[in-house]
Image: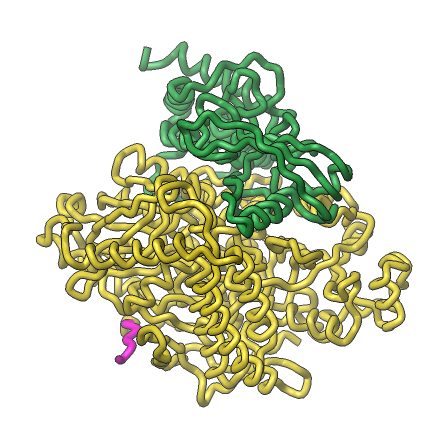
Chain colours: A green, B yellow
Amino acid sequence: MNLTLKVWRQKNASDKGKIVEYKVNDISPDCSFLEMIDILNNNLVELGDEPIAFDHDCREGICGMCSMFINGRPHGPSDEITTCQLHMRSFKDGDTIFIEPWRAEGFPVIKDLTVDRTAFDRIIEAGGYVSVNTGSAQDANNLPIPKIDADKAFDSATCIGCGACVAACKNASAMLFVSAKVSQLALLPQGQVERKQRVENMVAQMDEEGFGSCTNTGACEAECPKGISIENIARMNREYFSAKISSDNV
Amino acid sequence: MKLDSKIPKGPIDKKWSQYKSEVNLVNPANKRHIDVIVIGTGLAGASAAATMGELGYNVKAFCFQDSPRRAHSIAAQGGINAAKNYQNDGDSVYRLFYDTIKGGDYRSREGNVHRLAEVSRNIIDQCVAQGVPFAREYGGYLDNRSFGGVQVKRTFYAKGQTGQQLLLGAYSALARQIKQKTVTMYNRHEMLDVVIVDGKARGIIARNLITGEIERHSAHAVVLASGGYGNVFFLSTNAMGSNVTAAWKVHKKGAMFANPCYTQIHPTCLPRTGDYQSKLTLMSESLRNDGRVWVPKKKEDAVRLQKGEITAKEIKDEDRDFYLERRYPAFGNLVPRDVASRAAKERCDAGFGVNKTGEAVFLDFGYAIKRMGKDAVEAKYGNLFQMYEKIADENPYELPMKIYPAVHYTMGGLWVDYNLMTNVPGLYATGECNFSDHGANRLGASALMQGLADGYFVLPYTIGNYLADDIRTGAISTDSKEFDEAEANVKKTIDQLVNNKGTKSVDHFHKKLGNVMWEKCGMARNKEGLKSAIEEIQQIKKDFWADVLIPGTNEELNLELEKALRVADFIELGELMCRDALQREESCGGHFREEHQTEEGEALRNDDDFAFVGAWEYKGEGTEPELHKEELVYENVEMKQRSYK
C-alpha cells in the first residue's frame, strides 16, 4: 500500500504546531498502524530528520499509552481497539490519513502526538482506591460477592486510562473515565466505607483539572477501546447525588 | 568473593516466621527520616513503594512511562497462583513450593521458594480487599483454574486481564500514598546510573525524559523493580520500553548478574509475519486448559497448509498429530512452557509447520466448543479470541489459532540473597529483575505471584533489617564526588550518542542483535553457535558506537536517544547471556543445549557439575567477566529428572 500521512508536528508545549505531509510506500496490510509509523520514523531518522514523537508501550491494547487521533477518531476507524491494535488492512491503497494528538485542555501537548495525561493520575489519587494497608486484609473468601456484581465491577475496571473518551467528547469531559473507577468500587462491598467521599473527591478533582461537563452525547462510549458503558456515568451521577444530599462536606 | 545466600537456619516451613521474629525494626518516628528509591512501578515496584509508604518511609518512585499504571505487568493475562486450596483438590503450601522447584528444573533456592509459597495466600487476601474483581462462581466465592506444570487448580484470575487488575490494585494503593505524600512519583524518568558511596547504594542519576535534564536523587536504599530483559531479542512479548538499563548499570557498578541465560520462550504467541514486526503478542497459557495443540500427521498436508491450499478443517481427526498429548499423556496440553515450546519447534523443524513461514502450530478450540458450547468458551476466553482475531484476521471460533513460541520472560537477573539484597549493600532487586525464585523455568501465573510477594510481603520486612542501621545517618547529600562522577559519566555517554552522527537508526542495530540472540541463544543453543554469537555481538557493539545516528538533542523529548541508551546496554547483556549459556554444559528449563539431551530429546541436566547459581561479576570494559558459583542445596526436595509423561 502507498499512503499519504498528514501528521501533527509540534516541537514542544509552547510551539504552535502544524500539519506536515509524509508519504509512505510499500506497506503490508498485515502491518500494524504503529509499525507503519515505525517505518516512517526509521526513514526520517536515516535522513537525519526528527522522528514523530508518540506514546506507545505494550502494543497489545492494554497499557493505555498509545493515543492517536486518526481521521477524526480516537484510535482510528475500528471499534473497540487501541491504536496499537489497528492494522493497515483497515485502510485502502492511496488513502490520505490525518494523525493528530488527543486534544483537550486537561491533556496539554508535550511534543507532536504525545500529550500529558497526569490529570488522570491526580483524579485517581483523589479517591480511586480502597484505603486498606498491606497486611490488614481478612481471608479473601470470607466475604462472598454475587457473581453479577463482581462481573459488573470487572467490566468497569477494564478501563485502561488512555483518554480516548476525553478526546472523543466535544466538551472534553472525563466522566467516563472517572465513573468507571467510581462504579467499580461502588459495586463491591470493599468500596462501601469510602463510597461517599470517594465520588465527591474524584469529581471535585476532575473539575479542577479543566475537563468539561457531560451532555450525554455518548461519543465516549462509542470510542472507548474497552467498550466501557455510559451506564457508569449514570451510576456515578446517582452516587454523586446521594453523596451530596447526605454529605458531611456541605 | 563468596556468595552468601543468608538463608535462615531451621526447618523449611519455619525459616520465614523465624526470620520475621528476629529481624531488626525501625520505629515509626525514625522511618520518616529514611529515604528509599524504587525504580519501576510494575507489580513489584508499585506494591513495594505503596507498602513502604504506608509504613512511613519517604519513598521516591520512578517510571519511564507517562503513568505508573502503564508498567508491563499490566499485560499479564492468565492469572496468579496461590496455595489457598479453595478447591479442596489437595493443594498446600508445600505443593506449590514443590511444583515451583520442579518446574524450575531444580535450579532455584529452596528457602526463597518456600517463602513465596507461604505468602502467596496473603496476596489474594490483599488484592480482594483492594477491590480487585477476580472471577467468581455463582455462590460468590473465588473461582480458580489450572495452569501448566501443575495438577491442581490454584490460579486466581480476572478473565484474561489478571495482570491489569492486579496492577491497577497496586497502582491505586500507590496513588493513595502519593496523595498522602509518603511517596513522590517521578513519571517519564529513566534511571541511568546508581551512585555508590562508601560501598553502599545511596542514590541514582535519572534523566527527565521530557526536558532531558540529568537529575540526582539520594536515598538510604535503592530498590530495583525494573523488570526483565526479554527485549534483548528485539522481538518479544515485552512492552516496547521494557529494558535492562537499570539492572545493567548496577551490574557495572558491582552487582552480580545471575543466570542470564535462563530465558523463557512462551509456547502460545502469535507467529511473526514480516520484517516490519515490532513485537510478538502472547495468547494466555490459560488457553491450553481447553485448546488442543496439533499439527498434521502427514507432511503433504503440512505443505498444502503452508501454501495456503487447504485449511485446518480439511484435515480429518485421524490425520492430526496431537503431539503434546502423544508425548506427555499425564500433563497433555498443560506441560510447562519450556517443554511445550521445544515440542512445537521440534515439529516445525521437522517440516510440519502450518502457516506460510512453516513456523506455527494449531491451537484448536473446535473440540472445546463441541464439548461445552460456544457461549461457555466465549465467557472464558472471549477477550483473548477477540484479540487474536484483530491481529491475525481469522475467526478462532471457526478455525484453530496459529501459534508459535516467543521470548516472554527472563528468569535470570540480579543476584540477591534471602533479603532480596544484591551483593551491593543497600541495593535491592525485586520481581522479574532479580533471579531468585523461578530457577531455570518459570511456571505460568507465578510471575504475578512473585512480583506482589516481593513488594507487599517480603521487601518491607527485609529492608527494615538493613535500614535499622541508618536511623542516625541523616539525609544523604547529592553534593559529593560520587554523585559528580556518576552524573559526568551519564552526560558523557549521552553527548557521545547525540553527537555521533552516524548513518543507521538504533533499531537497525537492535534488530541485528535480536537476530543473533534468537538464532544462537534462543530455544536451542550449542557451543559453536554461542562462540560465534559472542564474536558477532562484539562486532555489533563496535558498529553501533561507530555508526548510530540520533537526530535532535538531549534537551527535549528524544525517543531515539532513549532507545539508544537502552540498546547499548542490551548489546553488552547479550554477550553475557551467550557466555553464561556457553559455560552451562547441561540442559535445564529454558536453557537447552543441543549437546545435552536424552534419546527422546528431553533436557538432560547435570546435577553433579551444574547445581549452582552462576553469578557474573563485571570486570571492566574489554575484560572477561568472572563467574562465581552459589551451590544449590536441596534438603527437602529430591532432585529428579523432570517428567510430565
Magenta part of the chain: B1-6
Relative image position of residue B233 (x, y in whole percent): 55, 64
Residue at 73% from the left image edge and 63% from the top image edge? B360
Whether the magenta-drawn stretch holds residue B522 is answered as: no
Numbered disc total: 0
Q: Is residue B488 above or below residue B344?
A: above
Image quarter for residue B308? bottom right
Quarter of the image for the C terminus of chain B: give it.
Answer: bottom right
* Residue A246 is at least partly visible in this image: yes
Residue at 53% from the left image edge and 24% from the top image edge? A166
Whether the magenta-drawn stretch holds residue B2 is answered as: yes
Quarter of the image for the N terminus of chain B: give it.
Answer: bottom left
Instruction: Name the chief secondary structure element in magenta.
Output: loop
Q: Is residue B47 above or below residue B329?
A: above
B588, B571: nearer the viewer: B571
Relative image position of residue B508 (x, y in whole percent): 55, 59
